[in-house]
Image (cartoon, rainbow, N blue to C red):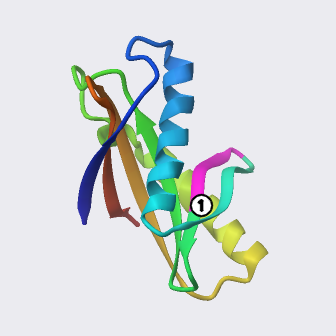
Amino acid sequence: MRSSLTFPASAMLIPSHQLGLDGEETSLHYLLGQGYELVHRNYRYRRAEVDLIVRRGNEVLVFVEVKTRSSALYGHPEEFVTERKRQLLRLAAEQVQEELRWRGDIRFDILALLPTREGLRVEHFEDAFY
């Protein structure tokens, strides 16, 4: 499933590091607004980092990769989630499931953000890969 929404941003021409931080913050607000509950933010395990881990009740545990780009000139944000990144997310997911003793379903989502005149546009790719 794919959905999109636009959130106001403080400034459109901002350094890439700040753009990334704004993207993560916007993504968190987006997910909370969709009824998700935050489990972990910037979870690290070995070489893996998961931007956001959320859940909706006990239904599903969602591992979210946030990709914020300043433009789509060289490709859409979701296209920059490499196979290596996917492997690392899977590794972290196994660890989190063990830590939480999670027995329910899991899912890997991508939130792709691009600046617009109105703010950051969020596109949500549910179940983006396995």
Give neighbour class at mark 1: few <14, some 14-19, many 20+ (Cα, 10 Å). Answer: many
The residue at 28%/29% (across/down) is 118
Magenta segment boundaries in residue numbering:
47-53
The residue at 74%/77% (across/down) is 100
Label 1 amino acid? Answer: Ile
The residue at 57%/31% (across/down) is 21
Estimate the x, y position of residue 77 in percent, counting from the top left.
Answer: 33, 36
Q: Which residue is mark 1?
A: 53
Estimate the x, y position of residue 15 in percent, counting from the top left.
Answer: 50, 12
Estimate the x, y position of residue 102 in percent, counting from the top left.
Answer: 66, 82
Estimate the x, y position of residue 32 in percent, counting from the top left.
Answer: 51, 60
Whether residue 49 appears in magenta in the rendering, the answer is yes
Whether residue 93 appears in magenta in the rendering, the answer is no
Work out whether residue 11 or residue 42 is closer to the camera in this orientation and state it. Answer: 11
Work out whether residue 114 or residue 35 is closer to the camera in this orientation and state it. Answer: 35
Disc count in the image? 1
Quadrant position of the C terminus in the picture: bottom left
Work out whether residue 26 or residue 48 is closer to the camera in this orientation and state it. Answer: 26
Question: Which secondary structure, mark 1?
Answer: strand
